[in-house]
Amino acid sequence: MPGNRLGTSLKAVFATLGSFIAGNALAAEAGHPVPMQIGFQEAVTPIAAYIHWFHDDLILPIIVAICLFVAGLLLFCVFRFNDRANPTPSKMTHHTGLEVAWTILPVLVLVIIAIPSFRLLTQQLVIPKADITIKATGKQWYWSYDYPKDQNGGFEFDSVLKADSDLQPGDIHLLSVDNEVVVPVNKVVRMQVTGADVIHSWVVQSLGSRIDAVPGRLNETWFKAEREGVFYGQCSKLCGKDHAYMPIAVRVVSEPAYAAWLQDAKKKYASTGGTSYADASSTKALTR
C-alpha cells in the first residue's frame, strides 16, 4: 500500500535523523569518532575550541553565503538572459564597475578569513611556558614517547596498537594502544615530534593538535587539556603499509593521579633508560 510505504520511509528518515543526533551527542563526550557523527569531536583545549569557532562560526557561514549568492546569480542569468527573454543578444563586452567588484570583494573575504587564521596559527606555534615536555617519535608503525629526566621523568616507552584479541571492555577497535600517553589536566604540555624513518603526523583532534613527524627535524606544538578523559588520534601522513594501524591515545588525569603514574612508569619502563631535556631538544630523530 502507498500509505504503508510512505510510513516506512518516514520512519527510516526519522530513525536516520535520530542516529545523527545520538551520534553527535555521544561525540560531545567521547574523545574519538563515533558512528553517525557529522561534526567535530568535543574540544577540550583552547586551541581546539578556537578551531571549532573558526570553522563553524566564521568559515561555514561565509561558504554558505557565497554558495547561495552564486546560485542566485546563476538562476538570475538563466531566467533573465535566456533567448526567450532576450531575442536580441546584448553587445556589451565589459563592465568596469562589475570587474572591480568581483576583484575587490573576494580580496576582502580572504582578508576577513586570514586575520583569525593567522591568529590561530600563532597560537598553535608560539608555545607558552610548558609545565611538561614530551617527545614523540613516529616509527613504522607505532609511536615512542620520551619523558625527560629533568621533568621528573627519565623513561621512554613504545605505544603500539592493541590486537583485537587483547581488547578489554571499554577499549576501541583500531584506536586503543598498549601504553597511553599520560598528562595532567590544566597543564601546558609541549610536544616535541620527530620521525625515525619516514614522515608521520601526530594528530589528536580533541586536543587541536596536528604536527608532522619529520626525520632529522624536531617540530613542536602544545596543548592544555581542560577535562580529564582519554582522547584518541591517528597518524595523518601516508607512511607505509600499516599507516592505518598506528593510533595515538592521550589520557588526561588529575595531578595526584599523574604523580602516581610517573612513579609507576619509572619502574615499569626503567629498562628503556631515558634522556635528559637537552637530549629531548636535539634535532636528531630518536632511534631505537
Image (cartoon, rainbow, N blue to C red):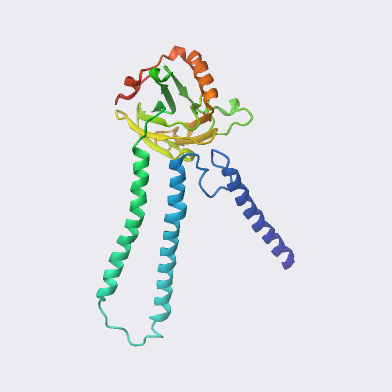
The quarter in which the C terminus is drawn is: top left
Determine if residue 174 is in view. no
Whether residue 46 sits left or right of residue 111 in the image: it is: right
Question: Can you give x and y, in whole percent of width and height, for residue 113 in the image?
Answer: 36, 54
Residue located at (43% from left, 46% from top): 51
Q: Which of the 4 image quarters holds residue 84?
A: bottom left
Whether residue 250 sits left or right of residue 11 in the image: it is: left
Residue located at (54% from left, 41% from top): 33
Question: Can you give x and y, in whole percent of width and height, for residue 189 in the image?
Answer: 42, 30
The quarter in which the N terminus is drawn is: bottom right
Vertical placement of residue 213 versus 35, above or below: above
Residue located at (57% from left, 44% from top): 28
Question: Can you give x and y, in whole percent of width and height, for residue 85 in the image?
Answer: 40, 85
Quick one: 221 or 32, which is closer to the camera? 221
Determine if residue 193 is in view. yes
Vertical placement of residue 54 versus 287, above or below: below
Quick one: 68 or 122, which is closer to the camera? 122
Residue located at (46% from left, 54% from top): 57
Question: Can you give x and y, in whole percent of width and height, for residue 76 in the image?
Answer: 41, 76
Q: Which of the 4 image quarters holds residue 96?
A: bottom left
Q: How many marks?
A: 0
Vertical placement of residue 70 versus 222, above or below: below
